[in-house]
Image (tube, coloured by chain):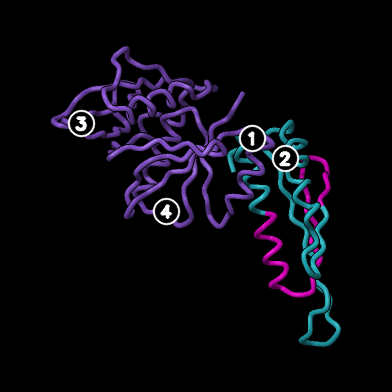
Chain colours: A purple, B cyan
Amino acid sequence: MQKVVFTTSRSPSPRSRTLLNALTLTLPSLKLTRGKKSMKEILSFAEREKALIVKIIEKSGNPRGFEILPKGEFLLFDGFSVVKGIKKLLQKNKVSKVVASEKEPLTEKAKKLKQFFLSLPASEGNFTTRVEIFQKGDREVLSLNVKGVECVNFYFRLNK
Amino acid sequence: MSTSTLDLISKIEVQIRFAPEKLENLEKIYSSVFPEFVKWPKGNTTVKLHKEKQFVCAYIQAKSLSEIRAALNTIHSWLYIAARILGENV
């Protein structure tokens, strides 16, 4: 089964690190602290183990999307927020799989991101993450819910 | 560490050992890190990888501390990435 490993660029901004920690807790995935490791090294291992590397990309210090390697595909979002205390909520338990509500997103970016989250392979764990879609003002929100708590919200601007 | 004169280091030997949480990952980590050693040695550094009971061991031999440091950093990176991708808690 293909594993998904989240990582960042070298010297990531504090917001990128926050997002990385929140995503690895709320999704069935692994975290790779980047340090001084080169992308070449990481990708050569990933190729051998058939793992997907998801790199958080940022713009002016703010996370703006994911780059899926070795495919080279981009998934973008316009903003995000992370709730405090996810670690306490999960209490060292892991998330086993991702399910989604039937509501389809309006924006193309949100659709792609939802599809990606749903494609994540299931692993061992006690909790299930639910992907919810709703609108808030002029923005569409894709939310990762664990135990009814909106842990990570991704925002997408609606073009009217 | 052996010295030919008081302040001149002639040879440094270091061995690092890594023990995975799950024993079944030992072989996988060893086999995934091993191909990287084909590109070695760099300069005067010699690196040898082997298995020893529940450990993956890397033996490094170099002529200066900076070479040892460079080799240690690289080997640490390799072992860390391999272990992390296999789901080890490093």
Residue type marked 2: Ile
What is the chain letter for disc 2?
A: B
In the rendered image, residues at marks 2 and 1 fall on the same chain: yes
Residue, disc 1: B86
Q: Crowding near pointer 1: few (<14 within 10 Å), some, many (20+)? A: many
Q: Are marks 2 and 1 in contact (CB under 8 Å)?
A: yes
Q: Name the N-terminal-most of marks 2 and 1.
A: 2
From what the image shows, is residue A71 above or below residue B79?
A: above
Residue B2: give x, y in percent of width and height. Answer: 84, 76
As measured in the structure, the alpha-carbon distance from the residue carrying label 3 to the one carrying label 2 is: 46 Å
What is the number of the mark on residue B29?
Answer: 2
As measured in the structure, the alpha-carbon distance from the residue carrying label 2 to the one carrying label 1 is: 8 Å
Q: Which residues are magenta?
A: B49-75
Residue B3: give x, y in percent of width and height. Answer: 83, 80
Residue A98: give x, y in percent of width and height. Answer: 43, 20
Q: Residue at x 42, y 42 (%)?
A: A20
In the drawing, does residue A131 fall left or right of residue A33?
Answer: left
The quarter holding residue B54 reads top right
Circle 2 or circle 4, nearest the eye: 4
Circle 1 or circle 3, nearest the eye: 3
Residue type marked 1: Leu
Closer to us: A5 or A94: A5
Residue type marked 3: Leu
In the rendered image, residues at marks 1 and 4 fall on the same chain: no
What is the chain letter for disc 1?
A: B
Residue A88: give x, y in percent of width and height. Answer: 36, 34
From what the image shows, is residue A117 above or below residue A85?
A: above
As measured in the structure, the alpha-carbon distance from the residue carrying label 1 to the one carrying label 3 is: 40 Å
Residue, disc 3: A158
